[in-house]
Image: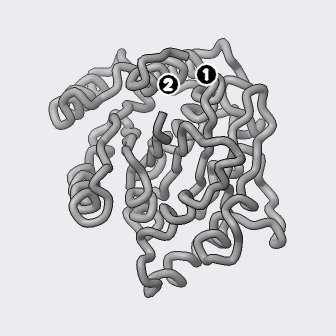
Amino acid sequence: MKTRIIAFVNQKGGVAKTTTCMNVGAGLANAGRKVLLVDLDPQASLSISMGAIQIKESEPTLYEVLKGKADINDAITVNDAPKPYCLLATDIRLSGAEIELVNEPGRDMILKNALNEIDPERGKFDYILMDCPPSLNILTIMGLAACTEVIIPIQTQYLALNGMAQLIDTIQTIRKRINPEIVIGGVVATFYDERKLLDQEVLKAVEEAFPDTVFNTKISNNVALAEAPSHNQDIFQYKPSSKGAKQYKALVNEIMAKEGRKA
């Protein structure tokens, strides 16, 4: 199986992008896949959620990898979970990368080149999942240049639709100029409440805009999903019987359906 490199992208914050990236990664690991999560957001929500709260300056992060100051293999860590998955963590230092790399030749390809340097002796990753920043900045462009597909989490509210056209235009531009492999792997509705007419109307609008692209699984507003990161756990560790865990397992099954296998 060729490594599937998936970028979770939406320039709007608060749409459960990090939550989706982390729990999809955990669900894939539970299904026996070898998974690497890459935190491309200087806010480091993914790294913090996985327990990488205090990164010492001597410990390499994605920032050092992008700056060419560290080997990517030295920066990858394994999280403590029943079915472990790996993390390429970041912290606030990554916020300087946008300025420092702005004039770097070939900057858009730096992340892709780094991922190509992962030592195969670690075992080939089946999935590399990237949590991109909530903006279309240099770091997001790097993620789009490196990925094979994009998953777009979108909150089922009208304001969440703003900027979607710009995101799609950006993806199409990346496909033409940098990364011809990139496709939209799916759109996932988050914070969905099937009882609300507004949610239904927004979902219908999204399905019309992205025919045959919206996942059947909808992620509802679930307390356990909000609580899990404070315990540095994914939803399957924290409350495996919760509605959130069941929904993310279903989403993972849809993502894996292209392989013809289920979790």
Rendered location of residue 65, percent (x, y): 64, 69
Question: Measured along the vertical axis of the image, is residue 188 above or below residue 98?
Answer: above
Asked which quadrant contains residue 241, the reply is top right
Q: Which residue is mark 1?
A: 31
Coordinates of residue 128 in the picture (x, y in percent): 54, 45
Q: Marks 1 and 2: CB-CB under 8 Å?
A: yes
Instruction: Assign the C terminus to one quadrant of the image.
Output: top right
**Closer to us: mark 1 or mark 2?**
1
Q: Quadrant of residue 140?
A: bottom left
In the rendered image, which quarter is residue 138 located in? bottom left
Image point (24%, 51%), residue name: 168
The percent coordinates of residue 228 (x first, y second) are 69, 32
Between residue 195 and residue 252, name the one nearer to us: 252
Q: Secondary structure at mark 1?
A: loop
Amino acid tagged 1: Ala
- Please tell me whether residue 26 is drawn above or below residue 54 in the rendered image: above
Q: Residues within 10 Å of mark 2 (few under 14, many from 20)?
A: many
Q: Which residue is more in the foreground, 245 or 142?
A: 142
Res. 163 visible in picture: no
